[in-house]
Image: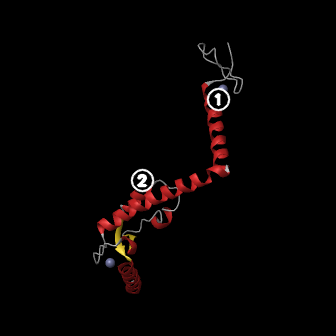
Amino acid sequence: MKYCKTCNNELPEDNDRHLECRHCRYLKDKANHNEYVKYWSQRPENQERIRQQRRKFKDERYAIVNAIKAERGCADCGIKDYRVLDFDHIEDNKEIEISRALSTRLHIDRILEEIKKCEVVCSNCHRIRTIERRTYERSVKKSL
Ligand SMILES: [Zn+2]
Ligand SMILES: [Zn+2]
């Protein structure tokens, strides 16, 4: 019987090539890979490439989200210019701030999930909504 030189678990009978079990080899490969990625991303000659990749990643996310804004337009006044449009959570169920999440590495699918909870509104209508909500909440409090 042979044993893994790292974790000491028994090696399967048909394993005559390796001194380590499959799991330990997997962990080591992964660590080597991570080391390499780290090394690569610190090399000066790769910085421009990394900058481009980051920009591309960001541009693609913004393009997807801006297309949704432009397509839906403001729910209140109908304006379709994505530059003035924002997402408004219609219920009290906000988990992420979409505009902020866009500049992080958060998966775009998660952002699109969050967008489903929102209406698209322009900044003017958004301001009006906020004021009206505040007035409504105050009047509710008063009537209690
Ligand atoms: Zn092992
Ligand atoms: Zn509007």
Q: Secondary structure at mark 2?
A: helix
Count residues near mark 1 (Cα–Cα under 10 Å), then give few for <14, some for 14-19, many for 20+.
some
Res. 143 image quadrant: bottom left
The kind of residue on which mark 1 rests is Cys
When the figure is inspected, residue 40 is found, relative to residue 26, above or below; the finding is below
The color scheme shown is secondary structure
Q: Which image quarter is the C terminus in?
A: bottom left
Residue closest to the eye, 43 or 17: 43
In the image: residue 28, left or right of residue 99:
right
The kind of residue on which mark 2 rests is Asp
When the figure is inspected, residue 64 is found, relative to residue 46, above or below; the finding is below
Q: Which image quarter is the N terminus in?
A: top right
Residue annotated with mark 2: 109
**What is the number of the mark on residue 24?**
1
Outermost residue toward the right? 5
Figure quadrant, ligand 2: bottom left
> Looking at the picture, how far across and down is residue 92, in whole percent?
41, 68
Q: Secondary structure at mark 1?
A: helix
Q: Is mark 1 within 8 Å of ligand 1?
A: yes
> Looking at the picture, how far across and down is residue 46, in whole percent?
62, 50
